[in-house]
Structures are given as structure tokens and as C-alpha cells.
Image (cartoon, helix red, strand yellow):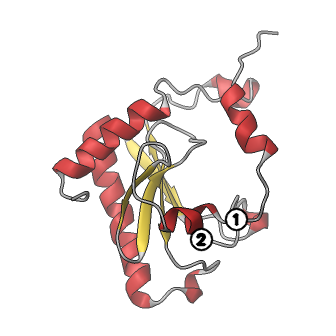
């Protein structure tokens, strides 16, 4: 059997598990390639996923640490939805995907990696992007590194006026 090495993934598998919420930590930071934070509003943030399912995999989260949709004020819920739309606009400009998977995993049993802080996933999809590798080899092959993705997505977001 051939083996594909993904040593970058160990950082995710091994931790840290210090209990700090990723999204809460990012709320106090400035957008930068090092933290993958693309842009922020007063109530929400938009970032790349450090462990993407596909190139360009973005996440939108409220700044408030809440687990459920019913816990969000109406205006923040609308902003999460608007920023999700904006993320698809940016990704469409950069990658021209054939479609998107957009959704939330609410609660651990639903697959939420950070169950205490809801967040929306925006994953660009292409015809044939899900070949035998994830099914048989349990490995996802991404053709572009995160640094390149960040640069491309941030530039498109600037051009579209989402980043000022």
C-alpha cells in the first residue's frame, strides 16, 4: 500500500487541548496570514479553515461564544448569513467552483469540532473533487497550500470591498 504523509495534520490531531476557543482567541486578533483570519466586523469574523476539506474552505463565526442558533441575536444571525454569502462571492471569484457545501455542525454528536462556538463552513466544490482518495485512502489531496490560498482569497475580498 502506498502512503501519503500529511505531517501538518498532527498539530490538529495532538492538540493543544487547553480549552481556549479558537474563535474567541481570534476575536482579539488582527487579520493576518499567520492566524488565517481574513476579515472581521464588530460582531463576526471570517477565516480560512486550517484543516480544510477543499482549498478555500472558509468559516464564518460570531464573536459571541454561543453554541446554538437560538442563542444568537437576530442581527448577528443575519450578519453570519450575509458574511456566508460574501464568502461564496469571494471564493467564486478566486476558484470558480461548480458549487458549495455550506452548513453548521451544531453539537459534538453532529460533528462539531468546536461545539461551544457555532460557526458556518463554506466549502467550494468541483466536479470530480471527491475521487477515490478520501474513500479508499482516507486522504484528501489539496493542490494548494494555505499560504497561497490566504493570499488569493484576501486579495479577492479586498477587491470586492469586504476587507478595507
**34 over 163 or under it: above or below:** above
Q: Position of residue 148 (x, y in %)?
A: 40, 30
Label 2 sits on residue: 118
Q: Which residue is mark 1?
A: 20
Name above or below for residue 107 compared with residue 52: below
Front position in the image: 7 or 102: 7
Residue at the (70%, 58%) spot, across then down: 113
Residue 79 got which mark?
Answer: none
In the picture, residue 163 is in which quadrant? bottom left
Of residue 34 and residue 39, the one placed in the foreground of this image is 34
Q: Are marks 2 and 1 in contact (CB under 8 Å)?
A: no
**Vertical comparison of 138 with 64: above or below:** above
Q: How many marks?
A: 2
Report whether 61 appears left or right of 88.
right
The picture places residue 65, in percent across and down from the top left corner, at 60, 77
Percent position of residue 69, x then y: 56, 81
Mark 2 falls on what kind of element?
Answer: loop
Q: Is residue 77 above or below residue 152?
A: below
Callout 1: 10 Å neighbours few (<14), some, many (20+)?
few
Q: Is residue 114 left or right of residue 41?
A: right
| Location of residue 41 in the rendering, given as x and y in whole percent from the top left corner | 34, 71
Q: Is residue 139 left or right of residue 72?
A: right
Quadrant of residue 111 within the rendered picture: bottom right
Q: Residue at x 62, y 80 (%)?
A: 68
Image side of residue 129 versus residue 131, left or right: left
Q: CA distance from mark 2 to mark 1?
A: 14 Å
Q: Residues within 10 Å of mark 2 (few under 14, many from 20)?
A: many
Q: Secondary structure at mark 1?
A: loop
N-term-proximal mark, 2 vs 1: 1
Amino acid at each position: 500500500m502506498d502512503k501519503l504523509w500529511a505531517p501538518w495534520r498532527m498539530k490538529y490531531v495532538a492538540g493543544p487541548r487547553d480549552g481556549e476557543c479558537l474563535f474567541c482567541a481570534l476575536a482579539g486578533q488582527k487579520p493576518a496570514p499567520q492566524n488565517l483570519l481574513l476579515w472581521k466586523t464588530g460582531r463576526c469574523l471570517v477565516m480560512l479553515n486550517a484543516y480544510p476539506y477543499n482549498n478555500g474552505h472558509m468559516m464564518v463565526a460570531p464573536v459571541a461564544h454561543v453554541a446554538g442558533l437560538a442563542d444568537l441575536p437576530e442581527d448577528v444571525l443575519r450578519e453570519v448569513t450575509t458574511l456566508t454569502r460574501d464568502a461564496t462571492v469571494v471564493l467564486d471569484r478566486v476558484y470558480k467552483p461548480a458549487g458549495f457545501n455550506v452548513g453548521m455542525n451544531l453539537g459534538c454528536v453532529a460533528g462539531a469540532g468546536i461545539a461551544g462556538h457555532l460557526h458556518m463552513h463554506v466549502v467550494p466544490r468541483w466536479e470530480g473533487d471527491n475521487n477515490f482518495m478520501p474513500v479508499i485512502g482516507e486522504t484528501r489531496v489539496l493542490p494548494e497550500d494555505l499560504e497561497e490560498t490566504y493570499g488569493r482569497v484576501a486579495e479577492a475580498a479586498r477587491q470586492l470591498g469586504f476587507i478595507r
